[in-house]
Amino acid sequence: MSKWIYFFEEGRSKDKHLLGGKGANLAEMSHLGLPVPAGFTITTQSCIHYLEEPDFFTSHLQEEILKAVSELELKTGRSFMNKEGLPLLVSVRSGAEVSMPGMMDTILNLGLNDERVKDLAELTNRHFAYDCYRRLLQMFADVVYGLAKERFDEQLDQAQKENGKPVQDFSQLEQEALVESYKKVYQSCRKSFPQDPADQLFAAVKAVFASWNNPRAKIYRQLNAISDKLGTAVNVQMMVFGNSDEESGTGVVFTRNPAKGQKELFGEFLLNAQGEDVVAGIRTPEPIQALAQHLPKAYQDFKDYAQILERHYRDMQDIEFTIERGQLFILQTREGKRTAQAALQIALDLVEEGLISQEEALLRINPKLVDQLIHPVFEPESLESAQPIAQGLPASPGAAWGKLVFTAQDAKRYHEEGQKVILVRQETSPEDIEGMIVSQAIVTSHGGMTSHAAVVARGMGTCCVAGCSDLSIKEEEKIVHYGKKSLKEGDIISVDGSSGKIYLGALPTSLIEKNENLEQVLLWADQHAQLEVRANAETIPDLRTAIKFSAKGIGLARTEHMFFGKARILEMRRLILADQEADRKEALVKLLTFQAEDFYQMFKEVGDRPLVIRLLDPPLHEFLPKEDVEIEEVAQELGKSPSLIRERIKQLVETNPMLGHRGCRLGISQPAIYQMQVEAVISSAIRLQQKGLAIKPEIMIPLIAEKKELDYLRALLEDHISHIFKKYSAQAFPYEIGTMIELPRACLIADQLAQAADFFSFGTNDLTQMTYGFSRDDIGKFINHYKNKEIISFDPFQTLDKEGVGELMRLAVEKARRIKPQLAIGVCGEVGGDPASISFLEEIGVDYVSCSPYRIPAARLAVAQASLLKKLEQERHQA
Ligand code: ADP
Ligand code: MG
Ligand code: MG
């Protein structure tokens, strides 16, 4: 028979899956001998069963709960069901495996009713007893029936006014009348408050189970990637009363500063108060240090227990306590949530204090947090000359620019087209989440520092300005007014989440000054890492960023962007539209000049680090104009007729461009473009060679599916390169020609390709597209259906699909290494920067991952974590 209920003595902190975090830690603290009021935990499994089949409650749980309550009566010497003796009141507290602060419900003082409140009043004092009862009535109504708390507060205010005195001076009759008025609130909604304590308990437990699925809990789980299947445990615990007198109180304390990480108690308390009074904000709590004056003994005890807990858990704790008549009780402990900055500081301090090892510190820091430490700021020079157009609250730090959009749908649409967007709304709501995720920054005209936009943005590490009332936002009309001017969808603005200022146009960004703690941690990380981290970068600013973050090289420099820019794209268009050889040659010469200069600068920037340059990848039609106006313009500039251009566009149109005339297929059908690119690469390397810089160019050919494609292109390029050495009268030097592995067929014939390639680089974006047959640009249209219906639990373009794409990669590595054991193999798709994918990449034996520059610090940490976890796994095997 399954066990649905555990007393605190029966569990340990490792039982979080079954007992929830709160329950497991209450158990652990009881075990440690800390003063924890007695109680028991109804398991998460019970919750899951109940939510699936409500009858489970009567058939399995009810009886068990009653038994546990009798045992609790024995343990505490108080009575819950019977009238004799001091009444046993309990709290009914939610608590899931993963802590979700404030997301689910709790009821205090359960067990009181019209009669027992009188008994309690006689045994203690009247004000206290009625205070407890009123709190119960109010919380029960809120949690069980969803009645607004304010409706009860109104009754209290009115009674105090009518009686002309504060509630603590009410007579017995006045207290009873007040309770009656609370019950009227129930009646007005056709509800009643159960007088039988057992009925109260059953209703409360069911309501806490159900709170697992309340909207805010669901959204929290979505945001934090917590499974909906875990369920919440319910803790039933004897009440201790912080509202007994002035020698009582309650508080919440972090053992270290959760914002910056300093080693100091950080928290607040209230005297003569219960539970949620601290957060409710009716009375202003005092800083915990002040407790030393009020209740020195309790304060000292608290400090001692805080230290015991921190040492026991070897991490910063977030502790809830209550003091009843001078005696301290600990009601909860958990790992404290902290900012990225504090996470680093605390991890480093704990190493120094000898509580954890370097390895543990590395394993504890979530690589995603690292991303938050390196958000960009606007370059100071550019800020000097920029005039802000509006000022709001600096809700989440960072700096970003993008095209203004007014709805989450538009944000997604622009994002899918590869555009940067800033979501501007009066305020945001949970329905906007998907749009917020893809936005560079979020701006609202309403709401404060704890508004939905602000909280969510901070959670995501996205820059946010909230409550910017200088802006008058018309979402329907897609227009925003500021002063006498206005902006519309698609206009570019810059947002500074650290100052709250908004600017017109795109201001250049750079990184915040160096973070010494981060550097320290990443230096440790590098010592443990087996995989190398390189960057996907091609522009000079991106290359600089990559190097600043200690990228070991550039795993992917795309050359597409070299064909954009006004002057360049004109030449590219001249080339594509040429009907005479002379035109074609002229365009190629111009493009060669541009690209040679680009490569020269890139090589110079990167120095002796490897730089893998990928030859042109996209299909040619991407370079042609689309709109009529643009077609006319281009026609004029190139001296051609618009109809000719339209004709050529028609020829180039492809039914399925993703599978179309692109990558090496272009190199084969139009060798001149690849030859030009290779000449640009080699000639710039020659120039640098002559200046004494040894450059070893690595040229990468995309979209290879056949060994003969590679053979053909390799021969073509090698031949051309030897001409180039002659043409520039230069001494030949080594270079490499490698290939991307981004088609399933390439994986399957990786042994053949290894014969013709000097290196491999997996392009996991295309490989995922081609393996799944999902287009990366369109997956957004259905991925949520897949997630909701539990067909796929993650986006395979963000996190590697190990079973499918991953298996192809594993096969390719094995086959290739059989031919060339030393072949360098990298991964340059989006998943190369994803911590969840990195362990797998290490396992199959790739040499490096390559990701966008800002993801490098997180990737360096993730790579170290992968190695450390592998080492731990091996040690476990040996043991
Ligand atoms: P949350 O998960 O929202 O923090 P809790 O279950 O921790 O909810 O309950 C909130 C507060 O209620 C606690 O911090 C504590 O002050 C009070 N509380 C809970 N159980 C008890 C108890 N047995 N005795 C006294 N106060 C309690
Ligand atoms: Mg709590
Ligand atoms: Mg590709």
Image (cartoon, grey):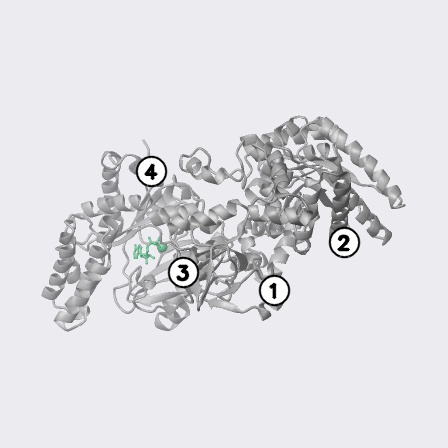
Q: Position of residue 34 (x, y in %)?
A: 38, 55
Which residue position holds label 1? 379
Q: Position of residue 826 (x, y in %)?
A: 67, 39
Q: Nearer the viewer, mark 4 or mark 3?
A: 3
Location of the C terminus (image quadrant):
top right
Q: Which of marks 1 and 4 is nearer the N terminus?
A: 4
Quick one: SS at disc 2? helix
The amino acid on which the numbered mark 4 sits, given as a three-letter code, is Ile
| Foreground residue among 277 and 2 | 277
The amino acid on which the numbered mark 3 sits, given as a three-letter code, is Ile
- Where is residue 873, by image quadrant? top right
Using the image, tell me which numbered label, if any, was put on residue 48. 4
Q: Which of marks 3 and 1 is nearer the N terminus?
A: 1
Q: In this view, does 56 lie to the left or right of 526?
A: left
Question: Disc 1 versus disc 4: distance between alpha carbons?
Answer: 52 Å
Which residue position holds label 2? 604
The image shows residue 360, relative to residue 301, as above or below, that is: above
